[in-house]
Amino acid sequence: MVTIKDIARAANVSYSTVSKALNDSPLVKPETKTAILTKAKQLGYTPNFAAKHLVTKRTNTVGLVWPEINRVALTELARHVNKMMAAEGKNILLSISDPIEAIALFSRMRSDAILLFEEDIPQNQLPAQLDIPLLSYGVPGINQFPTVGVQHEYAMELAVSSLVQSGHASIGYVGMVDGIGRRQLAKQAGYLDALKKRELEPVLVDTKGLNSIDGSTAIAAFLTKSSLPDSLICSSYDIAVGTVRAIRQAGLSIPNDVAIISYDNIPQQAEGDVPLTAVGVPVETLAETLVQELLRLIAGEDGLVQELVPELVVRTSSRLRKQ
Amino acid sequence: MVTIKDIARAANVSYSTVSKALNDSPLVKPETKTAILTKAKQLGYTPNFAAKHLVTKRTNTVGLVWPEINRVALTELARHVNKMMAAEGKNILLSISDPIEAIALFSRMRSDAILLFEEDIPQNQLPAQLDIPLLSYGVPGINQFPTVGVQHEYAMELAVSSLVQSGHASIGYVGMVDGIGRRQLAKQAGYLDALKKRELEPVLVDTKGLNSIDGSTAIAAFLTKSSLPDSLICSSYDIAVGTVRAIRQAGLSIPNDVAIISYDNIPQQAEGDVPLTAVGVPVETLAETLVQELLRLIAGEDGLVQELVPELVVRTSSRLRKQ
DNA sequence: CTGAAAGCGCTTACAG
DNA sequence: CTGAAAGCGCTTACAG
């Protein structure tokens, strides 16, 4: 492995001059700089990250802890965060290992910060005190770390309110019921509250999982026993995809037979056979907030707990039915 | 940030003794060791990865370059590789950035090796010579690096042969047609060869993308113009999911109206409404081969180019039709 | 068993 | 402008 000492020898300068040249310091004469850079390229030099970090104390690396790399909406969010962090000169490194181990690894690596996409870690398993900042994406209050979250309850209120205004009196919910995901539980609670407030009867369709296939299976099973409510709120994009599939499979039409509102404000919602009305914080806003907060934490500022306000985007799937 | 020197001070020993104690060296007296370990825990010590690596020359880290974290089959493969590498004491770090930048990053980080899940990088953009081993997952011969691949052509031969034996004379292909993915192109070529050999007429259904939604959209569009062949080979699990959705949506039955064989030998193929016949190298075999090869490369042995042999698993979706 | 010393590959004041 | 020196946080021969 070639080091700056090898370059120094080849270029007949001291290795501290090489270091300066490689970092484009104004302290080194242009000709010397060019000569050194040429030699470095010739020798196939690759800077040693660890050595550099050891002295500069910065890794410009942010660890993303995300064991489940399989939700479309989260993938979209990760993609945005990755891109925006790159623009700030920070590299996102993703671990799909056990969250506790992943946090420990990023700690040892002295990542500038850790972003946690997994919220179901028992509080007592999280390190009581971390030396590097950790930002949690999820429901505030589940751990002691700064958190960026979404007002899920308000999102459900928006969805229910919109359906009611369109004349729907029976509104169902498709998602994991009484599951372990905090985000999922918050959505369910929000739905139940919004219905209760209006004295409407809730209908819960339990998907028992979060994949689109879980959504379609649950709807198909439900249909063998009874007919669907005339509108459904799906707890995520994936669930909505499965729900739409099962409904159309049953020969029903959207929105005429069943109106649909999906969770997750991502562009994909518009791109299916039936453009889906969606509620949620726009993925760009979410990403931007996460990045801003990470940069603040890295700069040593105090962590905040934020809950972002969701928006409703109306598309075909919940348009007013022709009476 | 607490260092071994802080621990040394607190425990009244030299910091080289602390280092030995933390590494569980037999050279240090048990009582001293216990005292040091206790102090370390008390102070909340986290070893500095960079410092350790700088002297030991090992990072025990493998970089996974995978910009598209959205294919079910690849996610399943990544999960297996991650788990198996963890068992070997190696940490997988994933980058979803531009592959060239990701490779450069892992180079600077001195990862023990790089695993490349993206095959459509122009040969001339890849570094001519890397100081750390790189293993490519994909079609052999597209770059100068050791590669683990799959005999896609043989997989297609297996699929076609199985359908022909079941009495199917019209066999279509659903996937990205003439796209840029090498794996996809190899599958398409294999399909065309297998049909030509039997003097059967090929039918290509172009999905123009790799998501399940692309599959269902393509099938639905195809159905507006003509009827489907009586059997279909889908180029991936995702495509098969979409294909099945669209077929059932059209009121057709699988396998009675249309038989389906899907690509990707993953457990998920069995779990849908219609258990899918699938062809491909079992994901466990694929993962094991990748891990073995990575470990060989890390040990300094020569890289190999391997093509694994796919297997066909027959399930409901291609069972003999009732005549 | 314990500690002093050298060194991993860099950066950065500080002299010259 | 250039170079010698110190030091980042560790490990590992080597003395004692």
Image: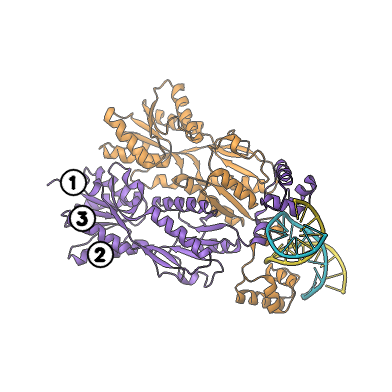
Chain colours: A orange, B purple, C yellow, D cyan
Task: State the residue in front, B133 or A92.
Answer: B133
A282 displayed left or right of B30: left
- Separation of residues labelled 2 and 1 (CA atoms): 24 Å
Secondary structure found at label 3? helix
- Separation of residues labelled 1 and 3 (CA atoms): 13 Å
Q: Quadrant of residue B252?
A: top left
Write down the chain letter for disc 1.
B
**Pointer 2 and pointer 3 on the same chain:** yes
Query: Who comes first in sequence, dot 2 or dot 1?
Result: 2
B136 displayed left or right of A243: right
Identified by mark 2, the residue type is: Leu
Secondary structure found at label 2? helix
Q: Is residue B103 visible?
A: yes
D13 displayed left or right of A155: right
10 Å neighbourhood of mark 1: few (<14), some, or many (≥20)?
Answer: some
Q: Position of residue A128 (x, y in %)?
A: 65, 38
**Pointer 1 and pointer 3 on the same chain:** yes
Task: State the residue in front, A204 or A59.
Answer: A59
Task: State the residue in front, B296 or B173.
Answer: B296
Q: Which residue is mark 2?
A: B192
10 Å neighbourhood of mark 2: few (<14), some, or many (≥20)?
Answer: many
10 Å neighbourhood of mark 3: few (<14), some, or many (≥20)?
Answer: many
Q: Which residue is mark 3?
A: B163
Secondary structure found at label 1? loop
> Which label is found at residue A113?
none
